[in-house]
């Protein structure tokens, strides 16, 4: 990368800090810090949920699948859209109507205090490790692109670029600063800013790559056989159905997404935010999965995991590669900041406060919440720094912890609808699925203690023949069957159901009133963000050599979108 690229990245980081600072002043209570006071516009919540699904893995893992298999990667990602639409119809509104301020509060009311600790530590451990690995992957990717002048202490002497260690620390610190300062408001609004940057960057890569291969017709003609198919032998229609079900559980019950549904004003807003999320994932994957697919027709022998960045490197002019790097950073930053905020809220309100004799004043709770965010951020960064020392063990850790995530999330959705299921049913479901999952994933080798059992070879053959379908069986079908059995076996309502109903009845009587500033300010932030991007594109168009017609088109489009956003006022 050259100096204009680095300047673009720095401008993007400054933008994140500015947005975090703007919304830092809005944080007066823990409700503001962790649920945006229940005042988030539905479209902000929907865009934030959409961005929370992104990480560096979107470009590395899914970009690699797109490079190897073609439009199968598009169909897999469209499953998220179907799942989110279903969540909008059936689940999102119920979360808002429940009246909870954190997902853990629902677990405490419905299943008891012990369940809160079990859920919190299990899900938080998994998500912390996952976010740390994503942060590490981002640092590996970007440290290879960012040059550092000789003599600077954070320069890697071997590569001449930003050292991996300092990349992890720097990227972690950037996310931590605006998340601690602005709470969920900052997370939501920076997610929207990151959405703009992501699509602006990809908006350059796709047409430039198509021009590189000679246009759309030439691109289609050069595609390998089967690249336009939506499924293949590995990713079948059964897998896609199961993948949709798994992500129905995830979007419907994972705490970062539940937080998006309870931070809006009404149940209808919660549904609309999920529908926006779903529509975006139904439409947009075909657009942001195109770069590695197109690049396959240019270089069929590249490393699949590097296909996305190689495609960008091939066609982007000076300055625009920096925007692509910023887009990759934004994808991971969105996911990391969401996890920091939601689990800091749970630790503050559902773990620490119940341990105190008296509830502290709101200002003290806000300080505690920010300290918890800081501690979690430091832990996450430390885990990311340790990833190279694990020698691949982090993948085993993630595999083990992921075995309980599906069985934990499904009962949360089930409990939204069911009067009967109890914490005992959850324990049975999680325990059974976890043990059987361990056996299927790690216990089917020739040296396994189970190798002498009847039918062992047939089970091994089944797993080897359809590993994706087996994942669906273990993560969707088995926990659903166990919960259905529990539902049929129980004859009376569980004690926690009445507590949830009581809280929901109280919540229905009070809805936050929105001031004109609260209604208008998010649109203003978007307008100024678009205007800033337009100004940046204008600078590149004026000072960079060569044909910059695409830059001029972007200036016009961004300016046209910024104007109504800056002047928007609610009707009535």
Image: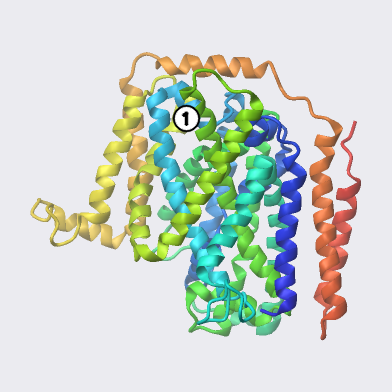
Horizontal and vertical percent for residue 565? 86, 49
Crowdedness of circle 1 by 10 Å Cα count: few (<14), some, many (20+)?
some
481 lies above or below 131: above
Instruction: Identify the residue at horizontal 58%, vertical 36% (top origin).
Output: 369
Query: Is 426 rendered above or below residue 440?
Result: above
Residue 46 appears anywhere in the view: no
Q: Is residue 325 above or below residue 180?
A: below
- Front one among 511 and 471: 511
Counting labels gives: 1
Describe residue 182's horizontal placement relative to residue 433 as left or right. right
How far across and how far down the image is residue 376, in percent? 51, 45
Q: How is the image coloured?
A: rainbow
As helix, strand or loop, the secondary structure at mark 1 comes to helix
**Residue in the picture at 42% in, 49% down:** 242
Residue marked by disc 1: 351
Q: What is the x, y in percent for residue 550?
A: 80, 74
Q: Nearer the viewer, residue 54 or 342?
A: 342
> Closest to the observer: 378 or 387?
378
Give the position of the C terminus as an image quadrant.
top right
Query: Looking at the picture, how far across and down is residue 408, in whole percent?
Result: 40, 37
530 left or right of 334 in image? right
In this view, 294 is above or below 12: below
Which quarter of the figure has residue 485?
A: top left
* Image quadrant containing the N terminus: bottom right
Residue furthest out toward the left: 452
């Amino acid at each position: 990368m050259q100096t204009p690229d680095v300047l673009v990245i720095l401008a993007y980081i400054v933008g994140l800090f500015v947005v975090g600072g703007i919304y830092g002043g809005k944080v007066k209570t823990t409700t503001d810090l962790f649920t945006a006071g229940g005042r988030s516009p539905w479209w902000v919540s929907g865009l934030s949920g959409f961005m929370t699904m992104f990480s560096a893995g979107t470009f590395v893992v899914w970009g690699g699948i797109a490079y190897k298999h073609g439009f199968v990667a598009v169909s897999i990602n469209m499953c998220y859209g179907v799942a989110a639409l279903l969540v909008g119809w059936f689940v999102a509104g119920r979360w808002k109507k429940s009246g909870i301020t954190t997902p853990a509060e629902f677990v405490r009311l419905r299943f008891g205090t012990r369940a809160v600790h079990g859920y919190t530590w299990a899900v938080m451990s998994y998500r912390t490790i996952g976010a740390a690995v994503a942060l590490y992957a981002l640092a590996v990717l970007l440290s290879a692109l960012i040059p550092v002048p000789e003599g600077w202490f954070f320069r890697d002497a071997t590569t001449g670029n930003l050292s991996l260690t300092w990349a992890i620390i720097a990227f972690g610190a950037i996310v931590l600063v605006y998340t601690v300062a602005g709470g969920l408001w900052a997370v939501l609004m920076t997610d929207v800013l990151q959405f703009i940057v992501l699509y602006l960057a990809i908006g350059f890569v796709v047409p430039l790559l198509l021009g590189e291969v000679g246009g759309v017709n030439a691109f289609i003609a050069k595609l390998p056989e089967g690249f336009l198919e939506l499924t293949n032998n590995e990713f079948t229609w059964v897998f896609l159905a199961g993948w949709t079900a798994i992500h129905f559980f995830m979007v419907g019950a994972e705490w970062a997404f539940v937080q998006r549904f309870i931070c809006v004003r009404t149940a209808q807003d919660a549904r609309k935010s999920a529908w926006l999320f779903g529509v975006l994932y139904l439409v947009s994957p075909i657009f942001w999965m195109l770069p590695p697919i197109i690049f396959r027709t240019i270089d069929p022998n590249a490393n699949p995991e590097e296909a996305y960045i190689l495609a960008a490197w091939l066609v982007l002019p000076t300055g625009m590669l920096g925007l692509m790097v910023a887009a990759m950073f934004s994808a991971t930053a969105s996911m990391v900041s969401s996890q920091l905020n939601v689990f800091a809220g749970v630790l503050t309100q559902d773990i620490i406060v119940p341990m105190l004799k008296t509830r502290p004043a709101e200002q003290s709770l806000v300080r505690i919440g920010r300290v918890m965010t800081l501690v979690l951020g430091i832990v996450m960064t430390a885990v990311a720094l340790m990833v190279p020392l694990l020698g691949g063990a982090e993948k085993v850790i993630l595999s083990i912890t992921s075995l309980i995530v599906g069985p934990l999330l499904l009962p949360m959705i089930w409990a939204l609808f069911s009067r009967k299921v109890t914490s005992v049913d959850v324990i049975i479901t999680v325990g059974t699925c976890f043990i059987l999952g361990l056996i299927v994933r790690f216990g089917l080798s020739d040296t396994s203690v189970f190798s002498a059992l009847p039918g062992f070879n047939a089970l091994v053959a089944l797993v080897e023949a359809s590993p994706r379908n087996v994942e669906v069986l273990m993560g969707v079908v088995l926990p659903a069957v166990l919960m259905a059995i529990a539902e049929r076996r129980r004859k009376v309502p569980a004690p926690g159901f009445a507590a949830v109903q009581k809280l929901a009845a109280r919540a229905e009587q009070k809805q936050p009133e929105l001031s004109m500033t609260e209604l208008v300010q998010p649109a203003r932030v978007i307008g100024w963000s678009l205007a800033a991007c337009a100004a940046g594109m204008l600078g590149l168009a004026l000072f960079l050599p060569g044909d910059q017609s695409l830059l001029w088109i972007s200036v016009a489009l961004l300016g046209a979108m910024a104007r109504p956003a800056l002047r928007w006022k609610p009707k009535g």
